[in-house]
Amino acid sequence: MRILLQFIKIGFRNIFRHKRRSIICISAVVISVFFIVLIQSLIGGMKNLVKTTILTYEFGQLNVNTKKYQEKKDYSPMFFPIEFSGKNEDLMQKLNSIKGITTFNRLKSFVVVSDGRVKNGILLGMDIDAERKFHYLNTSKRSDGLIEGRFPSGDNNECVLGYLMARKMGVSPGDSILIKAVSRTLSDEFIKLTVTGLVDWSYAAYDKKLILMDRSRLSQKLNMNGFAQRLTIYVDDERKLDVYKSDV
């Protein structure tokens, strides 16, 4: 114990004996620790943002789909829909009756855009009002992300575009775009959409490619006839995923 106290005394004596050197060393340590914490926080924040965005638009925590769809999921095919003895709405009600689970029916298709500046895109059909109430579409700004115009309705062929996609195509609200998608019956469907708004999705990959329209309207255009491509499930507590899986 006496030796330890002696070392402490020597240490403090050296700190005050060379004040300038001590100040420089302490400053270097503080600055280094500050930047390490800052960089780790930025990286952690970026990872969480990407994770939250992908969970919001792509996967949720759980998915219900067919085995054949799962095998071809990278292509988001329409022709392997969920077959349920009743209506898909009944299946969703059963899933939503499970405590801690919220289920959404979505459609996703890779489409060809008839524009020389943007050749392809991701067409996403959502129950927009319900999803806007449930979570933020722009996760970084905690908003619906709408920059200009309005979200599409289910009464007409309307859509909103990522603002980077719209900028590259040179379109604005009120303009029209033509896309080609593959329907459930494997036919090519050409759809003319009126752009009603521009959105910042807080994720560059979506800002450049994502086209959002009302799910029920998209279901009609792609001959889904009430079928579900997949059901996306969000849970209240990710730590209980195994419990939710068994309940589903």
Image: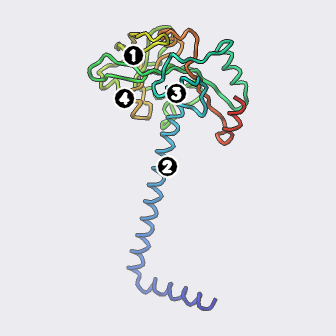
Quarter that holds the C terminus: top right
- Relative to 216, 24 lies left or right: left
Above/below status of 219 relative to 238:
above
Q: Nearer the viewer, residue 79 or 215?
A: 79
Q: Which residue is mark 1?
A: 195
Mark 1 or mark 3: name the one nearer the start of the chain.
Answer: 3
Identify the amino acid type marked 2: Gly
Mark 1 or mark 2: name the one nearer the start of the chain.
Answer: 2
Name the residue: 69% across, 19% down: 93
Secondary structure found at label 4: helix
Q: Give the Cα distance between marks 1 and 3.
A: 33 Å
Identify the amino acid type marked 3: Glu
Q: Quadrant of residue 174?
A: top left
Which mark, by number, is residue 44? 2
Looking at the rendered image, the disc whose residue lies closer to the viewer, 1 or 2, is 2
- Relative to 171, 45 lies left or right: right
Which mark, by number, is residue 3? none
Secondary structure found at label 1: strand
Q: Which residue is mark 4?
A: 208
**Crowding at mark 3 (Cα within 10 Å: few <14, some 14-19, many 20+):** few
Secondary structure found at label 3: helix
Asked if the residue at tag 3 contacts the one at tag 2, i.e. Cβ–Cβ closer than 8 Å, the answer is no
Q: Which residue is mark 3?
A: 71
Residue 152 image offset from top left, x and y in percent:
47, 15
